[in-house]
Image (cartoon, grey):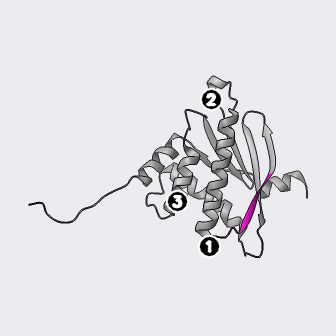
Amino acid sequence: MGQQNKNQEALTINIDGTPSDGGDVRLSVFVSKLDNVRSALQETDKYLYGINKKTVEFLVSDLTHSSPSAVSIKMQPSGDVLSHQDQIFNYFSSLIADITSGTYREASASYYLLTRLNELASGVGDKFSKMWLSYKGEVSAVISIETLENLRILLAKQYISVGSIK
């Protein structure tokens, strides 16, 4: 299988550093965002399949630093659990794209998944300029300040009280 085909199957996360760092991504930010991606993908797997057992292992298939920094992640089935691997990357990317665009208005995904996405988006504009995901050779989602703002709105706690005050 050629390198191009391997990249077609992988989800690539691209991160632009801040102008103050010359566009380079700080190591602490890169490691933190990579851990956030892992956590969010695992939560996506759990949300889609409704089980606490991993259906896939996420593997780093490529890693580059050439402004932007990029890491490609592929999936491998985990044990004897049936997995529809394509759905994990598709749902993950689509959910982020919908949150960024503002079309995802009702928090129908799990609170835990939205929290993981909020952690992934945290620091955008401050610790890194932007992040975008590529899947199957196309940009599938962008994580921007709008993503973070929309996630905070979705995660805002709302309390409704019924009754009267005497």
Dot placed on the residue nearer the N-terminal end, 2 or 3: 2
Mark 2 in CB contact with mark 1 (< 8 angstroms): no
Q: Front-most of 78 and 90? A: 78
User: Which quadrant of the view contains residue 136?
Assistant: bottom right
Lateral position of residue 82 relative to residue 130, left or right = right
- The Cα–Cα distance between marks 2 and 3, rounded to whole angstroms, is 29 Å
Q: Which residue is mark 1?
A: 51
Q: Name the residue type under label 3.
A: Tyr
Outermost residue to the left: 166
Residue 87 is drawn in which quadrant? bottom right
Would you call the spot at circle 2 few (<14 residues within 10 Å), some (14-19), or many (20 or more)?
A: some
Stretch in magenta? 50-60
Report how far apart the C-alphas of labels 2 and 1 lie in the structure. 39 Å
The structure residue drawn at horizontal position 65% and vertical position 43%, both measured from the top left corner, is 32
Report the residue marked by disc 3: 112
Residue 134 % position (x, y): 70, 50
